[in-house]
């Protein structure tokens, strides 16, 4: 892998094309059981441009009352579908921890969707890394330091890329500036899927 910031490891093309197709098909089934929802900002209720779902025991949700992890879909009330085996195996291979993942956030970026610079701090366990996979159109990803004013660098995350955020980069500011149109033929519609596997609770 390439270390793009301290503790931030990047494996371009970690999943080959057949692997990407298999994962995309599993996600289509997951999104039938747990449809994409539109998260909203706490207090203001302003909608995100990214739509979301989850798989695994816990899922991240955001609405006018706040951000949280919960075991059920906010609209259907059903438990989240289980992790695809491929993700459980990828975590064991790349994450460098014996702590099991508890949540996988599925982000859907239509062309034009973006995610502003933020830190991920809704988990109780920051010693565990976050592991991300990209599918579909390429994204311009920006990562800085642990202070919002720290300098940032950008990389293009393409379909099949894996990214591990561990150590100092676990609490780095990061975001998605834009999606590059028509940069992949993987998905049946224009856009990008990002998966983030996470540990939520402290080790027990
Ligand atoms: C994405 N997702 O591509 C982005 C970046 C999110 C989110 O930021 O919170 O769902 S995936 C890479 C990532 C995830 C978590 C933490 C960090 C990077 N980081 O600390 O740099 O949809
Ligand atoms: Fe994030």
Image (cartoon, rainbow, N blue to C red):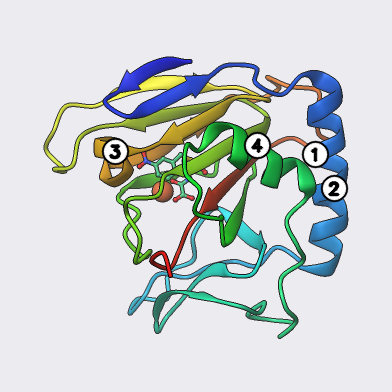
Residue beneath disc 3: 167
Residue beneath disc 4: 90
Mark positioned earlier in the residue sequence (3 or 4): 4
Find numbered disc 3 in the image and state the secondary structure of the residue it sits on. helix
Q: Quadrant of residue 142?
A: top left
Residue at (56%, 55%) from the top-left corner? 101
Residue at (55%, 47%) from the top-left corner? 196
Mark 2 vs 3: CB contact within 8 A: no
* 1 or 3: mark nearer the eye: 3
The reply to whether residue 188 is visible in this rendering is no
> Separation of disc 1 and disc 4 at Cα?
12 Å
Mark positioned earlier in the residue sequence (1 or 4): 1
Q: How crowded is mark 1: few (under 14 residues within 10 Å), some or many (20 or more)?
A: some
Q: Tag on residue 26? A: 2
Residue at (24%, 27%) from the top-left corner? 152
Find numbered disc 1 in the image and state the secondary structure of the residue it sits on. helix
Q: How crowded is mark 4: few (under 14 residues within 10 Å), some or many (20 or more)?
A: some
Find numbered disc 4 in the image and state the secondary structure of the residue it sits on. helix
87 over 183 or under it: above or below: below
> Separation of disc 1 and disc 3 at Cα?
27 Å
Mark 2 vs 1: CB contact within 8 A: yes
11 over 78 or under it: above or below: above
Mark positioned earlier in the residue sequence (1 or 3): 1
The reply to whether residue 130 is visible in this rendering is yes
155 over 27 or under it: above or below: above
> Separation of disc 4 and disc 2 at Cα?
15 Å
**Where is residue 163 shown, x and y percent of the image?**
50, 30
Label 2 lies in ligand 1 vicinity (Cβ under 8 Å)? no
């Amino acid at each position: 892998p390439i270390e793009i910031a301290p503790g931030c490891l990047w494996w371009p093309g970690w999943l080959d094309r057949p692997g990407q197709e298999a994962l995309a098909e599993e996600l289509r089934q997951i999104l039938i059981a747990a449809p994409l929802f539109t998260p909203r900002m706490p207090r203001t209720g302003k909608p995100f441009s990214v739509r979301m779902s989850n798989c695994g025991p816990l899922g991240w949700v955001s609405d006018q009352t706040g951000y949280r992890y919960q075991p059920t879909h906010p609209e259907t009330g059903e438990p989240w579908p289980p992790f695809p085996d491929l993700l459980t195996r990828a975590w064991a291979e790349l994450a460098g921890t014996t702590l099991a993942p508890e949540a996988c956030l599925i982000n859907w970026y239509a062309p034009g969707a973006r995610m502003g610079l933020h830190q991920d701090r809704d988990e109780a366990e920051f010693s565990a890394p976050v592991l991300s996979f990209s599918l579909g159109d390429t994204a311009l990803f920006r990562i800085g330091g642990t202070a919002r004013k720290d300098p940032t660098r950008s990389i293009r995350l393409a379909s099949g890329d894996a990214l591990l955020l561990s150590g100092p980069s676990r609490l780095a500011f990061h975001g998605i500036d834009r999606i590059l149109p028509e940069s992949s033929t993987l998905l049946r519609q224009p856009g990008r899927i990002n998966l983030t596997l996470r540990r939520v609770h402290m080790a027990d």
